[in-house]
Structures are given as structure tokens and as C-alpha cells.
Image (cartoon, rainbow, N blue to C red):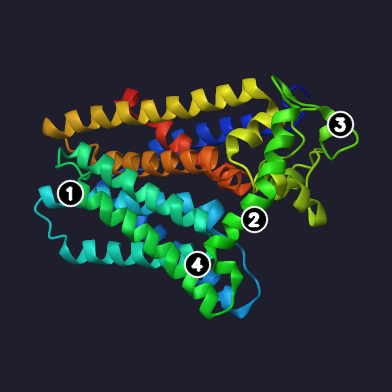
Amino acid sequence: MALIAQNHLQFIIEIGIILYIGIIFLLNLFPMTLSAVLFVALGLGIGFTVLFGIDALYLFLAFGQNEFTHPFGPIALLAVITALAALPMMKDSGVEIGKLKGFIYLIIVAITIFGGLMHRSFLLLWLLGLLIGVFLISKSFRQKSIFTVKRIILMVAAGLAGFGALELLSQVLQMPIFSPLLRILRLETFATPSLNMVINNTTLLGHEPESAYWATSTGFADGYISLPMSLLLLFGLPFPVFFGILVNRKDTIDYMLPGIFGWSYDFGYLTLIMLLIWCASIIFIGLKMLHIYRERRENGDKKYLGREALLIGSLGAFTAQALIGLFLINRSMNGTALLTFIFLSAMVASHIVLLKKD
């Protein structure tokens, strides 16, 4: 009975352990050649382009939106950054990459448009992730720095143009769902009361029970931060869950506040500190492993090219999701997106075991 999770946090930790073990075995069982990694990355890139495109189309048809960008956007990032990281490796091996590079860029543009139509927070995640990914690639292959004044100005201009285009589109089509200004207005209206509620009721080990919706609240792990409800129901766990009209109550934290407030309210300040340490540790591990892979590649060892490309993609996606989820919108690392977040962290951390194997 001790192995059965008693609350949401225990369940998150247990699923995390299972994912870590599973990914370690998975990456050791299958050959991580550059061609295999690139093939899977391109397949995922095409798949998510179609998936996000259909979801964006449903916006105009006014039915059936699934909002795939929140849970699967970081995995799409993993795919395209991994594909981008494979390009210089192939070029160094004498492979012509012109057409492949154009195809990858086409995927990036398509996902940018489709995902941006669905969620403005995804657009920020996507652009930030691409920036981090290109930076990691430039460092891994000792390329010139991507951070020049001209490029920074162009990126800022591109971001502003994207949000401006969405606002114009919302006005022309009279579809407020596309409007970035509407999102800002909602934050102005609802974020401040939510923030006051969190700050006034958060403790070291959770929150004041009377501030939660549940009459039987223990003041800890009330479901504001959780894994997908379908996963909870699959195992028949008797945890409090938000569904139906109750989702509006969850949104006061899940949709209106950054993750640092959601995690601190549901699990306490101590858990938030441990979460931040864990995120920093994963990023440190990823950077350290990239340094080791680069040294081996530069010494003529070509066995780890696939793993290096995969690590660059995983680290770039994890870092972007952590920054957006913790400091912008909690929903980017909650529910199914939390499962994705744990998955990406495991994809980074597992490289320690892969290196020790050799």
C-alpha cells in the first residue's frame, strides 16, 4: 500500500520515476544513430504540423478545438531543434543539406503560424525555444554567436509583427479568440485577485485549507497542479480533480498565474524551491553532457552524433518550457503538459546513464 500515491504530488513523483526508468531503457535498447534520430525528428515535425494545422482549422469552423499546443508544443520543439542540430553534423560529413534545411524551415514556419493562431503563449514558447536551440547549436559547433544587435532587433520585430498580425486578424474576422490584447486584458482583470489569493494563503507546506474549493481540503495537493485527469481515472485514484464548471475555479491559478505561484500554492514554498533546484540541475546536466559530446566529436568519435542532436533538442525544449511555465503561464507545465515536462527532463537526464554505459 505504501507504493500507492496518496496525493497529487506523490503521483507526479511516482510517474516521473517510471518515465525516467523507461526512457533510460528505451534509449539504451535502440541505436541512437544520427540518421535514426533525424528520421524520427522529421516524422514528429510533420505529424505536429498536421495536428496543429487541423486544430487551427477547427477555430474557423467553430468546433472541436483540442488545444494540442499546450501539451505537445514542447515535443514539437524537441523535434525541430533536433533536426536543426543534425544539419551541421551532416554537412561536416559531406552530405548535401540544402533541400533538407529548406524542408525543416518550412515545418518551422507552418508550426509557427498554426500554433500561434491557437495560443499566444505557445508562440512565446516556440520563439524562445528556437532561440535557445539555435544558441545551443552555435555553441556546440563553435559557430559565431547568434546574438548580434541586428538579429536581436529582427527577432523582436518579428515577434511584434506576429502579435500585431494576430490582433489585426482578430479585428478583421471579428474573432476575439485571436487577440493578444484580449489575453492581456484578462490578465489585468483576473490575475491580480488570483495573485492576492495565492500570496495571502500560501505556506511552507501548502496553503490555508479554507482558501481552497474543496470542503475537505488538507491544504496540500488539492489538484491545482496535477497530471492529466485521464491518468488519474485510469488508476482509479481518489484525488480531488477539477472538471466541468469547476475548471473555472482551477483557471484562477492554472491560466492566470505563472507556475511559481501555482506550485507554491498547491504544494508550498519548500516544494517550489525543490522544483527550481531540480529544473536548474536538469539544465546543468544537459550542458555538461553537451560539452562531453562535443569533445568526443571533435576528437574524431562519431558514435554519439545522434545522441548529441537529441540532447540539444531535449535541452532546448525543456529549458523553454521551464521558463514559460514557471514565469509566464502555469498551464504550460500542468496537466498533460506536466507529463511532457517530466518526459523532456528524462530525455536530458538519461544521457548520464548512456555515457556511463560506454
Is disc 3 surrounded by few (<14), some (14 to 19) or many (20+) residues within 10 Å? few
Q: Secondary structure at mark 2?
A: helix
Q: Nearer the viewer, residue 220 or 251?
A: 251
Report the amino acid beneath label 4.
Answer: Leu
Report the amino acid beneath label 2.
Answer: Arg
Q: CA distance from mark 2 to mark 3?
A: 26 Å
Look at discs 1 and 4 and give the one toward the viewer: 4
- The answer to whether residue 178 is above or below residue 241 is below
Q: CA distance from mark 2 to mark 1?
A: 44 Å
Q: Earlier in the sequence, mark 1 or mark 3?
A: 1
In the picture, the disc for residue 88 is: 1
In the picture, the disc for residue 117 is: 4
Q: Secondary structure at mark 3?
A: helix
Q: Earlier in the sequence, mark 2 or mark 1?
A: 1
Q: Position of residue 100 (x, y in %)?
A: 22, 63
- Whether tag 1 and tag 3 are in contact, CB under 8 A, the answer is no
For this orientation, the residue located farthest to the right is 215
Is disc 1 surrounded by few (<14), some (14 to 19) or many (20+) residues within 10 Å? some
Report the amino acid beneath label 1.
Answer: Pro
Q: CA distance from mark 1 to mark 3?
A: 57 Å
